[in-house]
Image: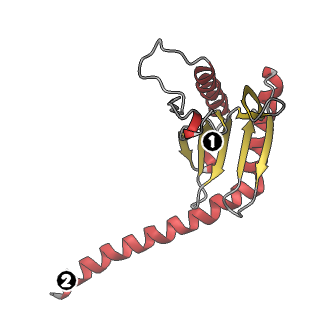
Amino acid sequence: MEKEEFKAQAFNLQRKVNQYKEVLQNTLAYRKAWKDSLREEIRAILLALVEATGLEAKVEIRSEIENLEAAMLTLGQSKSGMYQKVNDDVRRDLIKHNGSLVYQQLFNGKIIVLINYPFIENYGQPRQPKTIAIYRPEELREPYYIRHMEEFIQEITNWEDFDDDEPNKRIGFQLNFGPEGVDGQQQ
């Protein structure tokens, strides 16, 4: 390899190394922004939206793993209204998870916004979360939160109002009541 060609390739490699270092620095900066203010800003905005709309919801900070924290608006859990008869005197209620809107840190400090759909325990498989978007901390602006909430409420409403008007619409679980009953258990 000639000296000039080597220099040119080394220059290109150096640009890639510099870009890599910049990405690593961005991760540190994004994580710092989350800790310094973004986590609390998201929580406060979600609480304000809950109050302004009268939505029955809680806002929680999930912090089990450092730098993978989440701020989450949750509609909580409730009895689904369905239950399994264990015997004549005992019944086992099926619990419904009512859905949530999640702002979670990714490994690189960016924020992913997700919708967790409602699901009923022991009644099929929960639907995969819907990703709304991924943001750098400085990209999250107040109008986005309202759009996220609107999309969340629309998705949850669609889930709750499921019917066969739209033939390919799925609510996140498939369950067949076969000869063995629910989930293969005899009735």
Image height of 108 relative to 137, above or below: below
On residue 39, the disc is none
| Residue 30, quarter of the rendered image | bottom right
Crowding at dot 2, Cα within 10 Å, few <14 / some 14-19 / many 20+, comes out as few
| Residue 41, quarter of the rendered image | top right
Q: Would you say 184 lies left or right of 1 here? A: right
Secondary structure state at the residue bearing disc 1? loop
Residue 111 position within the rendered picture, expressed as x and y whole percent measured from the top left: 61, 49
Q: Name the residue nearer the viewer: 137 or 65.
A: 65
Residue 152 position within the rendered picture, expressed as x and y whole percent measured from the top left: 63, 29
Nearer to us: label 2 or label 1? 1
Disc 2 or 1, which lies upstream in sequence? 2
Residue at image x 68%, y 62%? 67
Residue 89 position within the rendered picture, expressed as x and y whole percent measured from the top left: 84, 31
Residue 65 position within the rendered picture, expressed as x and y whole percent measured from the top left: 71, 62
Can residue 124 be seen by looking at this rendering?
A: no
Q: Name the residue nearer the viewer: 128 or 148.
A: 128
Are the residues tagged 2 and 1 within 8 Å (C-beta)? Answer: no
Q: Type of residue at label 2?
A: Glu
User: Going by the picture, which residue comes out furthest to the left?
Assistant: 2
Q: Name the residue nearer the viewer: 10 or 60.
A: 60
Image height of 152 relative to 105, above or below: above
Q: Type of residue at label 1?
A: Leu
Secondary structure state at the residue bearing disc 2? helix
Please name the residue that numbered disc 1 is placed on.
140
Please name the residue that numbered disc 2 is placed on.
4
In 3D space, how far apart are the residues under numbered discs 2 and 1 (Cα atoms)? 45 Å
Residue at image x 57%, y 62%? 26
Q: Name the residue nearer the viewer: 50 or 139.
A: 50
Q: Quadrant of the C terminus?
A: top right
Residue at image x 65%, y 24%? 153
